[in-house]
Amino acid sequence: MKKILFILFFSVLVVGAAFVIYLKSNPPLVINGYTSADGNPTIRLIEIENKGIRELQLQTILVDEKLPESAKLIVSKSEPFETDTKIENNPNMTFHKLTQVSIFPSQYIDRQAIGKQPQHYAIQVNATTIQKVTIQYNYLKIPFTLTAVLQPNNEQKNDAN
């Protein structure tokens, strides 16, 4: 009986370790692109997407290894974040604290519910210089870190690391 319990415990331990290793090697949060907001190079919009199967929660963001002047999570219920996207006074975009709203998995977003459900997520970062962004978040109560190097004064779409 003890041998069966030991084998069962060991099997659960091995499966759990394999699951954590899989999650760490395939993190759910990705950066789809980034752009300057309203042509201001000190304000960057970093579009993020949850490729996982459960919600994730942002914790902190660092810009060049320091806390930024300000950082907000923007939830869009309509269009994706592009160079000409109107951010201010847009009724389909809401601003939140980083930890206030969970990032819903993109595979479960109803693309037909435009204007009703969140469709896209971005982080608005205000900093004088922005070269490297580090996003810390929790997924399935496991801490993760995503780091991206941004090209200075060069708006990119789908080119962040």
Image (cartoon, grey):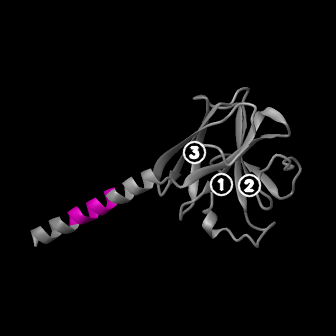
Residue sitting nearer the eye, 92 or 39 = 39
Label 1, on which residue? 101
**Where does residue 17 sit, x and y in percent of width and height?**
32, 56
In the picture as drawn, the residue positioned furthest to the right comes out as: 89
Residue sitting nearer the eye, 3 or 150 = 150
Label 2, on which residue? 75
Tag 3: amino acid = Gln
Residue depicted at x 82% and y 46%: 83
Please tell me how crowded label 1 is: few (under 14), some (14-19), or many (20+) other residues with Cα within 10 Å. some
Counting residues from the start of the chain, the first of labels 1 and 3 encountered is 3
**Where does residue 42 sit, x and y in percent of width and height?**
77, 31
Examine the image and state in which quarter residue 37 appears. top right
- Does residue 94 lie above or below 46 as drawn? below
Tag 2: amino acid = Val
Q: Is residue 155 left or right of residue 140?
A: right
Q: Is label 3 in a helix, a strand or a loop?
A: strand
Cβ–Cβ under 8 Å for marks 2 and 1:
yes
Magenta region, residue range: 9-17
